[in-house]
Amino acid sequence: RLYGEPMTKGKEGWSFMVSGSVSDLMNIAFIALQDCFPEAWLIKNGHDSGIWSFPETTPRESVIPEVKRIVNRTWDVNGVQIYCPGEFYIVDDTGTKTYI
C-alpha cells in the first residue's frame, strides 16, 4: 500500500513495476549466461547491468555472440513484447575498455 498524494503514489507504483521487471530480466539472463558458460564468474551485479569474468582459455569468438544472443532479444513482460538491447565491452588485463 502506498501513502501520499495520488500522483506520487502512481509514479512510485509504476517505478516499482518497472524496476521489478528489469531485475527479473537480469536474473533470467544471468542464469542463462551461467548455464552457457559455467566457467564464467559474475563479478558485479548492478540494477540493469552485470560485469562478468571469463578465463583466458575461453575464446572471445565464442563468448561475444552467445552473450549478445542471450541478452539482446525480445522479452515478454506481462504479455508485452519489449526489446532491450545491451551495451557490451571487454576490459583486458591492462584495464583497456573496448566496446563491441
Image: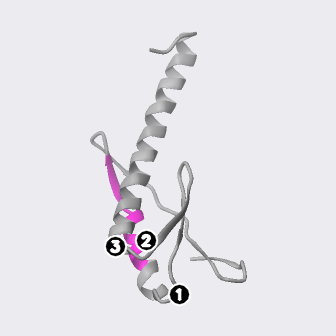
Q: At x 49% / y 39%, what residue is drawn?
A: 19
Q: Which residue is mark 3?
A: 36
Q: Is residue 79 placed above or below 31 in the rendered structure?
A: above
Q: Is residue 3 magenta?
A: no
Between the C-alphas of marks 1 and 3, the distance is 16 Å
Task: For the C terminus, give its image quadrant.
Answer: bottom right
Residue in front for this viewpoint, 56 or 65 = 56
Foreground disc of the pair 2, 1: 1
Q: Is residue 45 visible?
A: yes
Q: Is residue 84 placed above or below 37 in the rendered structure?
A: above
What colouring method underlies this structural image? Answer: one colour
Q: Which residue is mark 2?
A: 68
The disc, 2 or 1, on the residue closer to the chain's N-terminal end is 1
Between the C-alphas of marks 2 and 1, the distance is 19 Å
Badge 3: few (under 14), some or many (20 or more) residues near its Cα, within 10 Å? some
The answer to which image quadrant residue 34 occupies is bottom left
The answer to which image quadrant residue 30 occupies is bottom left
- Specify the segment rendered in magenta: 65-76
